[in-house]
């Protein structure tokens, strides 16, 4: 327990200080939650039109200066599924030996995940701005998956230790991204070793209301407020908890 408390204290300090350099320091007027939700939805649609998958499933922005990607298929033209929560997902393929991902499973996830804040510019265009890397475990050629992250399922002792250390009564939503949990229900784990070359399964785009919105949240970044998430990922394998 003592080690967990020390880890939580250290992690919180490091994440809330060192990552401030990566976060958006520009002050923008706060809009209502209803307006932010609308911005999120509109920005997602623009993102789907402005980006495509490369041959290994990486999301790439269309170039404004080159014609090399003119024949690429925008994400918008795939089978885009939007859930009632506002979560949008695209599945590129179904794994050959796929396995259902359980709600409490330990997942091994390879990913290039970015957070954004949806804003309206001076010309009235709504889009994702201030991109910040949330996780990037994609290496050259092979996988380097993250194992059992708390933003998917937080262990009881970790949550309890945080609440004890900081005299809080937070529930699981303080750590967990509900939109990721919801989106992964529509995917299967690939059940492959970490050494195998990656082929990203697709994308789950989570509007801020299906992430942390403006609620208290664990400081994975200096601020989680109004952050939408784009999970470009592959589930290598899962384990029962």
Image (cartoon, rainbow, N blue to C red):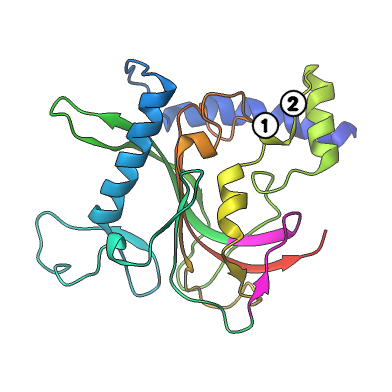
Q: Find residue 194 and name its label.
A: none
- Provide residue 234's location: percent of width, then percent of height: 54, 66
Residue holding disc 1 = 174
**Quadrant where the C terminus lies?**
bottom right
Disc 2: CA contacts within 10 A as few (<14), some (14-19) or many (>=20)? some
Would residue 80 be found to the left or right of residue 126 on screen?
right
Residue holding disc 2 = 170
Toward the viewer: 7 or 221? 221
SS type, badge 2: loop
Snapshot quadrant of residue 25: top left
**Quadrant where the N terminus lies?**
top right
Would residue 187 be found to the left or right of residue 74 on screen?
right
Q: Is 100 above or below relative to 12? A: below
Q: Residue furthest front?
A: 84
Tell whether position 100 is magenta.
yes
Tell whether position 115 is magenta.
no
The magenta-colored residue range is 98-109
Snapshot quadrant of residue 207: top left
């Amino acid at each position: 327990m003592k080690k967990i408390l020390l880890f939580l204290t250290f992690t919180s300090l490091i994440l809330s200080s060192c990552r401030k350099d990566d976060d958006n320091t520009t002050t923008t007027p706060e809009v209502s939650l209803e307006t932010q939700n609308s911005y999120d939805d509109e920005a997602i649609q623009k993102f789907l039109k402005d980006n495509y998958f490369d041959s290994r499933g990486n999301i790439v922005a269309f170039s404004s200066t080159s014609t090399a990607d003119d024949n690429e298929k925008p994400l918008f033209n795939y089978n885009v599924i939007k859930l009632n929560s506002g979560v949008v997902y695209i599945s590129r393929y179904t794994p050959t030996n796929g396995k259902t991902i359980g709600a409490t499973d330990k997942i091994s996830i390879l990913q290039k995940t970015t957070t954004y804040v949806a804003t309206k510019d001076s010309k009235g265009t709504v889009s994702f701005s201030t991109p910040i890397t949330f996780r990037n475990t994609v290496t050259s050629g092979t996988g380097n998956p993250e194992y059992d992250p708390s933003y998917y399922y937080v262990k009881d002792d970790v949550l309890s230790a945080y609440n004890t250390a900081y005299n809080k009564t937070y529930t699981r939503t303080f750590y967990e991204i509900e939109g990721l949990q919801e989106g992964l229900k529509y995917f299967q784990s690939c059940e492959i070793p970490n050494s195998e070359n990656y082929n990203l399964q697709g994308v789950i785009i989570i509007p801020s209301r299906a992430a942390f919105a403006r609620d208290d949240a664990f400081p994975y970044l200096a601020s989680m407020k109004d952050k939408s998430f784009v999970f470009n990922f592959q589930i290598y394998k899962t384990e029962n908890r």
